Image (spheres, grey):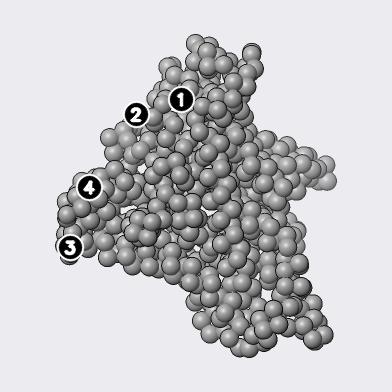
Amino acid sequence: MIESKRRRRVIGNIATYFALATLSMFCTGPMIWMFLTSLKYEADIVTQTMQYIPRRVTFDNYVAIWTQSGFPRLIANSLVVTFLTVTICVATGTLAAYAFSRFAFRGRTQLMLGYLVVRMFPAVMMIIPLYVVMRSVGLVDSRFGLALAYTSFLLPLFVWMLKGFFDSAPKELESAARIDGSTRLGAMVRIVMPLARNGLVASSVFIAIAAWNEFLFALMLTTGQGSRTWPVGLQLMVGEFQLPWGVLAAGGILSILPVIILFAIVQRTMVQGLTAGAIKG
Amino acid sequence: MQALGELSETRYWMYLLLLPSLVMILLVIAYPTLYGMAISFREMRLTRPGLGGWVGFKHYAAMWSDAVFWIALKNTVVWVTAAVVLELALGLLAATALNRDLPGTKIFAVLILLPYFLPNVVAGHMWALLLDPRLGVINDLLVRVGVLHTYKAWFADPNTALAATVLVEAWHGFPFFALLLLAGLKSIPEDLYKAAAVDGAGVSAQLRLITLPMLKTVIAAAVILRVIGLVNSPDLLLILTGGGPGDATQVLSLYAFQTAYKEFNFGYASALSVVMFVILMVFAAAYIRLSRITKGEGDD
């Protein structure tokens, strides 16, 4: 009886590891392949017999994408847009998340649901009028305009995620500070914000990754080099120049590197916030 | 600072806190949305600036006899259903495995969640390379193990194009399910399983009687969020196939986008996206009612 139980457990563990290994391969395999491709000479990519491990390694593809395609400019634009988006979301969203977390007022639930519902609006439905409006106020092809547009779908997410983190900061400490004579504002800045610091970082990183990766709004709302972000640049390179795969792969690796690093650093906190926000929503 | 501190003691304080974000949202969402709905009743083509004015339900009537619209509607349903089913299955598998908390699962969790944070553009091109009819490693592997005789142009063949894009979407989206389902699994008390084991329930009975019922809410929420996300965003299909070959992978969001961006027919594109939005809202309302995910949801 006990013997068979142990055997079943061992078999279960083996099956679990097998499933995890297979899934991990499915998830990371394409990325590893892209990385290997980025290290190959073009002749070794376009070859009759597939080279699984590159026989000769080169960094020419990285040099090429960086020097020949205006990539630094695209990356710089993306950095600015991402920074502006995060700034707007943190500045306005933190206050809202705090209000939703700490105050009971009429229409609170409806308003929170309202923030969520606007997430459901089709991107296309937003982009067309945004394009028309931004064209009339001169914000098409501006990095600030793009950041404003990103706010439309990232601010609600940010508020929901951060509210979860504020909720888990104990209210007692805040009450204690208020009894000691601190104002609500003082208690928020000095007590609650430090307690929710990890959550604030994780939510901001989540917004930053999403802004860094965004493609559709950027494609529609940028028309020239002035504000074009890297996803659009990379996509246009494929169409216009028929870039060799190695260079394209190098571009992909360069542009997802910050995402992977940021995700690896804050993944635990970010995952907590995401699941809490999504499940409550 | 002093004055703000005093202000924070008044009963208007929470409204002041909400104001900045509310203004932002009204500015970048509410106004464009209403404006977009208005455009759908107007003639607006960037290529013909002289054209203008209200045309009533003209665009909506045109949709009725637009063959591409119906193809796109059908493709949307097929594509979203297939992708969500596949993502749910993979997500459940991943979450169940990760929930066993064996040594090393933390690293596996990071690897498995990673695709969700990669951009569509890179995901699209990466898979285009993997499935390339000439250079694709997947073709090579399939030929080696004998599943295929020759390399296949997955995205260029109308019979396989939609399925191939579903695979890419599943790769990109299943970690989202894994994430939510794992959180759901973690919230199930261990005692329930112990009690069931004492009563002699096997693995499949435990899955059927405890896990799935306890996960119902999470699954319902994850599915609706994903359906909304998939219906609304044409990114991946735009990058992978552009709706082709023919209209084999044309979906509503992509059709609306192309009508706006390639033909600059903003009026018709707006009407398309409004119809898409209405269908989605009707579906969401019906779905929420059916799955009763609002049941027992109070003012947390």
- In terms of sequence position, does the residue under pointer 4 or pointer 2 come before the other? 4
- Image point (51%, 27%), residue name: A68
The answer to whether B6 is drawn above or below residue A13 in the figure is: below
Q: Of label 2 and label 3, which has the lower sequence position?
A: 3
- Residue that carries the numbered disc 2 in the rendered image: B157
Report the residue at 56% width, 81% height from top: B15
> Label 4 to label 3, Cα distance in Å?
15 Å
3D distance between C-alphas at marks 1 and 3? 44 Å
Check chain identity for marks 2 and 3: say if they share one.
Answer: yes
The image's mark for residue B203 is: none
Please tell me which residue lies in front, A272 or B81: A272
Q: Amino acid at mark 3?
A: Gly
Q: Secondary structure at mark 4?
A: loop
Q: Residue at x 46, y 37 (%)?
A: A233
Displayed quadrant of residue A86: bottom right
**Residue annotated with mark 3:** B53
Question: Where residue B192 sits in the image (x, y, percent)?
Answer: 71, 62
Q: Chain of mark 4?
A: B
The residue singled out by tag 1 in the image is A243
What amino acid is at disc 4?
Answer: Thr
Residues tagged 4 and 1 counted as in contact (Cβ below 8 A) = no
Q: Pointer 2: residues within 10 angstroms few (<14), some, or many (20+)? A: some
Cα distance in 3D space between marks 4 and 1: 31 Å
Position of residue B100 in the picture relative to residue A2 (left or right): left
Cα separation between marks 2 and 3: 42 Å
Residue A277: horizontal and vertical position, in percent?
60, 63
Which chain does the numbered disc 2 sit on? Answer: B
Q: Earlier in the sequence, mark 4 or mark 3?
A: 4
Q: Mark 4 and mark 1, same subunit?
A: no
